Amino acid sequence: MVSFFACLAALIVGYILYGALIEKVFKPDDRTTPCLEHSDGVDYVALKPWKAFLIQLLNIAGLGPIFGALSGAIWGPSVFLWIVLGTILAGGVHDFLCGMLSMRHNGASISELVGIYLGPVMKTVMRIFSVVLLVMVGVVFMVGPAELLAKLTPNVFTVTFWTIVVLVYYFFATLLPIDKIIGKFYPFFGICLIIMALGIGGATVLNADTHPIAEITLSNLHPEGKPIWPLMFVTVACGAISGFHATQSPMVARCLTSERQGRLIFYGAMVAEGIIALVWAAAGAAFYQGTAGLAAAGGGSSNTVYDMSIGLLGPVGGVLAMIGVIACPITSGDTAFRSARLTIADWFRISQKQSRNRLILAAPLLIAGYLISRIDYQVVWRYFSWSNQTLAMIALWAGAVYLAVKVSPISSLMAAIPAAFMSAVCCTYLIYAEEGFHLSASIAYPAGIIFAVLCIIVFIWKAYLPGMKKDRRL
């Protein structure tokens, strides 16, 4: 239990100290923000900071810090270190830079930001990549809650029924102005999410005598001996760093009235998500009395979440916790489709003030999402995880170029180091994993390192391209 509380304290201290450092480096100022300059009553709508924080938390959380953390805990409490260090040094920096750069560029989506800092080729790649990822996120966060709802209504409603219900909700949430559904209901759901995590964490601590929380060890405790590198670093897809956040932060960036709110809303929400992931990782291994029991239960799945909620909090508390877990992914799924709509709108410069334009873009995305939802959920999740971390890698490199050009070469290391790390992770995973090329570790590991080195070389070249320093848009 000492390791758990030490990691919890580290996350809080990380927000206070490292969050303040990245804010000092970026230098937020009092310039007019996009929501005040381009207010349209649909996507550019001013929100109060506390509302924006809870909306950002719900947008980025989804099932990632729950399902991903539970699956990552199968490798043992070494996952605690990845959650803490990843959140502070990578995920928080990633989310902060994505949100703040979007504010500096009129609320631009991540694909447009990547184009500014990494060039037109990467812009095109990122446009396609981010839309595909967002649809997959929408699918993951459509099927996951549908399965949980079916658990609460056995012999009454099926998973297919609840999938359609969630899809209908996504349709309206994607089309309506952000303050009509998201601004009104998400703060409440955000509070439910926080209470749910506190309940699961508190019950786990109280049961520590019979179900102890493991102390940190670097040993690989996976029952099947699957390697920590790179599998665990991709499996914990949202509890440490997530490219999905790069698509969500610009959406909230369009609703802030001051750049000085960025640290709380972008970096702070990532730390809150890290805490949620830490709670579920610790609770999962403790509840099932070890990694073997957690693996046998299926790791991160609707079954484990249901059993843990009922087992730790009883029937009433369990249902309340389940509601939080259900609301969490639903409120990320709808904003995933919303972000996909905005990405395409930015791509083709289609105004979103008219409801007809929003419908033309949203309908095909939602139909594609439903069709993909018929594929096996575990398969979709594995591809989502890798795609998610790859997008994070690209976004971090874009942020590193910004810092190198506009601040200093030394400051760019705050983004370049985690970007290089994630480059090695993503390349190694793609070559090694079953859903990738499925080659041996002797090939995958060196290839990952070589790829990371090549990315560093390209970064140095991009950061000092002739004329970059003269581009006032940066």
Image (cartoon, rainbow, N blue to C red):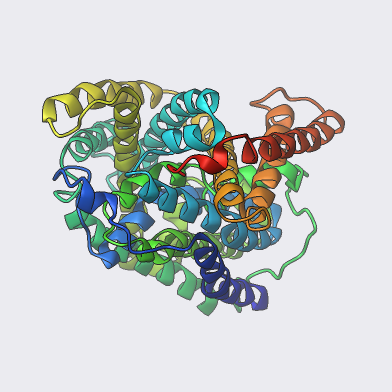
Task: Estimate the x, y position of residue 193 in percent, counting from the top left.
Answer: 35, 62
Task: Estimate the x, y position of residue 132 in percent, counting from the top left.
Answer: 44, 26
Q: Is 372 situated above or below 133?
A: above
Assign the N terminus to one quadrant of the image. Answer: bottom right
Residue pictured at 38% horizontal, 27% vertical: 373
Task: Estimate the x, y position of residue 435 in percent, counting from the top left.
Answer: 64, 26
Residue pictured at 17% horizontal, 51% vertical: 179
**For this rendering, which residue is in front, 459 or 174?**
459
Residue 391 appears anywhere in the view: yes
**For this rendering, which residue is in front, 206 or 87?**
87
Left or right for 88, reference 321: right
Left or right for 75, reference 7: right
Residue pictured at 56% horizontal, 68% vertical: 21
Residue pictured at 71% horizontal, 22% vertical: 437
**For this rendering, which residue is in front, 149 or 372?**
372
Task: Estimate the x, y position of residue 32 in percent, counting from the top left.
Answer: 28, 56
> Dividing the picture into quarters, in which one does residue 392 lie?
top right
Residue 298 appears anywhere in the view: no
